[in-house]
Amino acid sequence: MPSREFYTMPTLRLVVAAPADVQADVVVVPVPSEGTVPALPDGLTAAIGALRDGKELKGEPFEMHWLRADELASPRVLLLGAGSGASMSTDVARRLGTTAGLAARSRGQGHVAVLASGALQAEEHVRALAEGLTLAAFHVDAYKTKDRKLADLQSAAIVVSEGAASTLADAVALGGVLGEATNVARAVAHEPPNVLTPAVLAERAVELFAGTPVSVEVLDEAALRDKQMGLLLGVAQGSVNAPRMIVLTYEPDANRESGVGSRESQDAPAAAPVLGLVGKAVTFDTGGISIKPADNMDRMKYDMCGGAAVLGAFHALARVGAPCKVIGVIPSVENMPSGTAFRPGDVLTGASGLTVEITNTDAEGRLILGDALWYARQLGATHLVDIATLTGACAVALGRVASGLFGTPDTWRDAVREAGTRGGDFLWPLPMTDDYKELLKSDIADMVNAAGTRYGGAISAAIFLKAFAGDAAWAHLDIAGTAWADEPKPYQPKGPTGVAVRTLIELARSAGSWA
């Protein structure tokens, strides 16, 4: 799908073997901060004990210590701090897997094996290890033609005891699917803006889902005009690269066979909930006439991470399925300054009929999402989630750790938050009371697109979006602070994070709990 190879999918294996017999370039031994390590040959056990006694190895999370152990079939060993066994979680297990894979790649090694023992042998932790190892295969330097720092990760084995193996093979496979879905989103997000225009993004979506249970429809500029999507078209009019709207549809097997939930039957009462995922995809955002500062403007290629998350989620759903129908709507534009660009003071009319006075052309994401949310409802979505790198204000409020979460009713917002917790995304609810509506009052239109104050920016943006969600259950994820990593960590290189992909997959797959 991408123009460059942003990741190689490693061969994932569940292996039942004694540590001494494991064949790999690197054997990774997770070392807890207290308690025992896996059953290892005497010499290696003694070496670990000596390091612990000398305080050279404390077992703190993601601490690394390399050594050789000639008693193993693979003498290159990485001792990887795993923290307290009592605090083991899927998040920690996922990060251990990614750290192990990246560490092996940094040493030029393409075949890694992780010894899973104790708490790490739980099914959910094995799945997370496999997911993390898959995430480690991502290349942030795909456009380099020389001096690439990391080797390809070709294979990854998770080594367990014989008694646990029968229940864990499926967990490894699922972890690979989830990890690859996130890598798909990261690959799309990392493409340069001169390569990934709205039209190219649409072409990539068609290629990605060819031959899968996910159908793709692309609305070009003429179709968008026919549907009177004036908010999206207003943002797009300053660029020579025409807009697109990508529509993805996943039907459960029964519906695909019977036609239930097809577009031809949209006028009939909904027999089952339909999940609508709406992802902002501004392939490059200059801010338009309200132009951004030059510093870090290159990062604005990431302003389509919401749309990338939706693509990644559907990539997984095409493989593992979901019990409900899922619709994805990805509005894609460039926001550029030119003689044809929309201006502060303009009034745009959305497909919903609502009018918007433009007070800041850099508040463009909420405009394209407004038309997209309306369209998702027309396609039958009863439960909506929109995902967007929407406001710097959310990053100011929550930093680079948590994504902002808004929604109504509270039960739906909480269901989305719980899906995020299970999937490994940290979502933090923010208020959205009627008092904040005052921020969006306009003298000449139904509302303004940006409040005339720097206070409560993430909240006023959410209030704006709610106007287009109607009576549907709706949630909004503001991922402006979490969509990319500014500083590298052992488990996350600098660059796109693929945030929210796991939340969307988990939400779709757990439809039985909220439907």
Image (cartoon, rainbow, N blue to C red):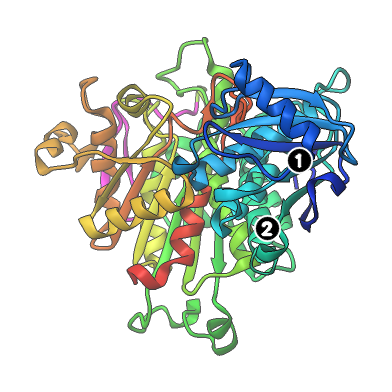
Can residue 197 be seen from the camera position used here? no
Between disc 2 and disc 1, whose residue precedes?
A: 1
> Residue 133 is drawn in which quadrant?
top right
Residue 358, image x and y in percent? 30, 31
Q: Amino acid at mark 2?
A: Val
> Residue 38 is drawn in which quadrant?
top right
Residue 262, magenta (yes or no): no
Label of residue 172 in the image: 2
Residue farthest bottom in this picture: 258
Above or below, 53 against 281 in this view is above
Dot 1: within a 10 Å radius of its alpha carbon, few (fewer than 14), some, or many (20 or more) residues?
Answer: many
Report the residue at 44% width, 83% height from top.
265
Pick the residue in front: 152 or 455: 152
Q: Secondary structure at mark 1?
A: loop
Above or below, 6 against 350 in this view is above
Q: Main secondary structure of the magenta part?
A: loop
Report the residue at 41% width, 49% height from top.
420
Residue 189, image x and y in percent? 61, 36
Q: Secondary structure at mark 2?
A: helix
Quadrant housing the C terminus:
bottom left
Disc 2 + disc 1, Cβ < 8 Å: no
Pick the residue in front: 349 or 412: 412
Above or below, 327 against 347 in this view is below
Label of residue 103 in the image: none
Dot 2: within a 10 Å radius of its alpha carbon, few (fewer than 14), some, or many (20 or more) residues?
Answer: many
Residue 505, image x and y in percent? 51, 58
The magenta stretch is: 340-359
Q: Identify the residue position indicated by label 1 in the image.
A: 7
Q: Amino acid at mark 1?
A: Tyr
